[in-house]
Image (spheres, rainbow, N blue to C red):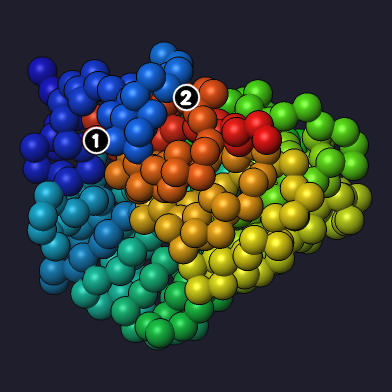
């Protein structure tokens, strides 16, 4: 029996066997392609099922019929979600009333998307609509938030940024004990359990630090790892998304970390940090997007930073970027594969690179 009634139709899962492909082997292969044939790779850390806290659902309207779920494999059609082995159990009871809500919205004509981040105090909802909101729409959204305990509902009208329709209470997520209000629909690690493994492997890979040591963090998001790092040393964090930078900076100031954690907006693809920017850094931590960090690695690889901690969600990009570090003389001293995406070919990894001693 399949792990899900939608398997084979929904494009969310590529395999019906969680152990295939061998994700530890995917990481070993990626490092091997980069020239690290004997890299020390830890056993696979697997996030439990039913722990995913983020979902980006597609919605379509055909007459009075509403489909809300994930797309079919290689298709624009939407599979109306009835179950999911990955999502937290709280998601599924929310879907039927969401369909009723969507059916009533004049801002939803043919196609929409619904991004739900399940935060520490409930579902933070972003609806991307294909028409303008009406006053009756706003009234219905407010009633939905109150009935279903959604701390915030935002709507992005066509060609517009998300606008809060209602904020019942400040939506928060805690990173290393610090309360952060993430942007609407903002990027999160898929599960708290997977995030904890990433953080643990990252902290274990740091060199010996003093209180005044300096860590540079690249692609910092809204502070997923920044606050854990700030407990170890001074952190200079860089992120290209303005809303994420605002969220992390506001949280740092509220937690009394101003000066200890400095968050700067910078598009590292267009304006990577240069060689001199890394001077004096004890460690660099980077968690680049799926395509990797090729533009930044051109400078980072030659900067001679003693320790580089690379967090990857794409073995192919990791292989390319790790190759640049190998050519610069770095060795792999630890690597941890993490299965945050069960029944898929994706694998998360934390790889610790150490500079050759001079």
- Left or right of 3 in this view: 26: right
In the foreground, 227 or 74: 227
Q: Residue at x 45, y 75 (%)?
A: 156
Q: Residues within 10 Å of mark 2 (few under 14, many from 20)?
A: many
Image quadrant where residue 151 sits: bottom right
**Foreground label between 1 and 2:** 2
In the foreground, 309 or 357: 357
- Left or right of 287 in this view: 338: left
Q: Residue at x 35, y 38 (%)?
A: 34
Q: Residues within 10 Å of mark 1 (few under 14, many from 20)?
A: some
Q: Which x, y percent locates residue 15?
A: 16, 30
Residue holding disc 2: 336
- Look at the image and tell me in which quarter the C terminus lies: top right
Q: Which x, y percent locates residue 318?
A: 39, 43
Q: Residue at x 52, y 23 (%)?
A: 334
Residue 248 visible here: no
Return the mark for residue 345.
1
- Which element type, helix, strand or loop, lies under badge 2? strand
Marked residue nearer the N-terminal end (1 or 2)? 2
Compared with 316, 193 (above or below) is above
- Look at the image and tell me in which quarter the N terminus lies: top left
Image quadrant where residue 177 sits: top right
């Amino acid at each position: 029996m399949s792990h899900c009634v939608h398997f084979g139709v929904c494009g969310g899962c590529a395999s019906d066997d969680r152990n295939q492909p061998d994700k530890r082997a995917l990481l070993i292969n990626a490092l091997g392609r980069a020239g690290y044939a004997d890299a020390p790779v830890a056993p696979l850390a697997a996030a439990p099922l039913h722990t995913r806290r983020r979902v980006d659902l597609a919605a379509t309207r055909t007459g009075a019929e509403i489909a809300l779920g994930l797309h079919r494999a290689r298709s624009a059609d939407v599979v109306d979600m009835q179950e999911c082995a990955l999502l937290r159990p709280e998601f599924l009871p929310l879907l039927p009333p969401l369909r009723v809500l969507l059916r009533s919205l004049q801002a939803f004509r043919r196609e929409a998307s619904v991004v739900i981040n399940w935060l520490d105090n409930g579902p933070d909802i972003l609806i991307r609509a294909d028409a303008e909101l009406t006053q009756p729409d706003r009234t219905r959204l407010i009633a939905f938030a109150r009935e279903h305990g959604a701390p915030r509902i935002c709507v992005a009208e066509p060609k517009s940024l998300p606008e809060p329709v209602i904020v019942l209470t400040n939506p928060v997520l805690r990173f290393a004990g610090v309360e952060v209000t993430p942007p609407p629909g903002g990027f999160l690690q898929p599960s708290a359990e997977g995030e904890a493994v990433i953080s643990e492997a990252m902290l274990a890979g740091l060199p010996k630090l003093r209180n005044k040591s300096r860590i540079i963090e690249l692609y910092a998001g809204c502070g997923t790892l920044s606050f854990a790092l700030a407990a170890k040393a001074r952190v200079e964090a860089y992120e290209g998304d303005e809303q994420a930078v605002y969220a992390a900076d506001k949280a740092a100031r509220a937690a009394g970390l101003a000066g200890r954690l400095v968050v700067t907006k910078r598009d590292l693809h267009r304006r990577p940090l240069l060689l001199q920017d890394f001077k004096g850094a004890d460690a660099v931590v980077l968690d680049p997007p799926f395509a990797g960090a090729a533009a930044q690695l051109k400078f980072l690889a030659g900067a001679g930073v003693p320790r580089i901690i690379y967090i990857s969600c794409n073995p192919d990009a990791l292989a390319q970027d790790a190759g640049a570090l190998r050519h610069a003389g770095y060795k792999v001293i630890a690597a941890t594969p993490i299965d945050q995406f069960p029944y898929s070919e994706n694998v998360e990894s934390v790889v610790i690179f150490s500079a050759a001693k001079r």
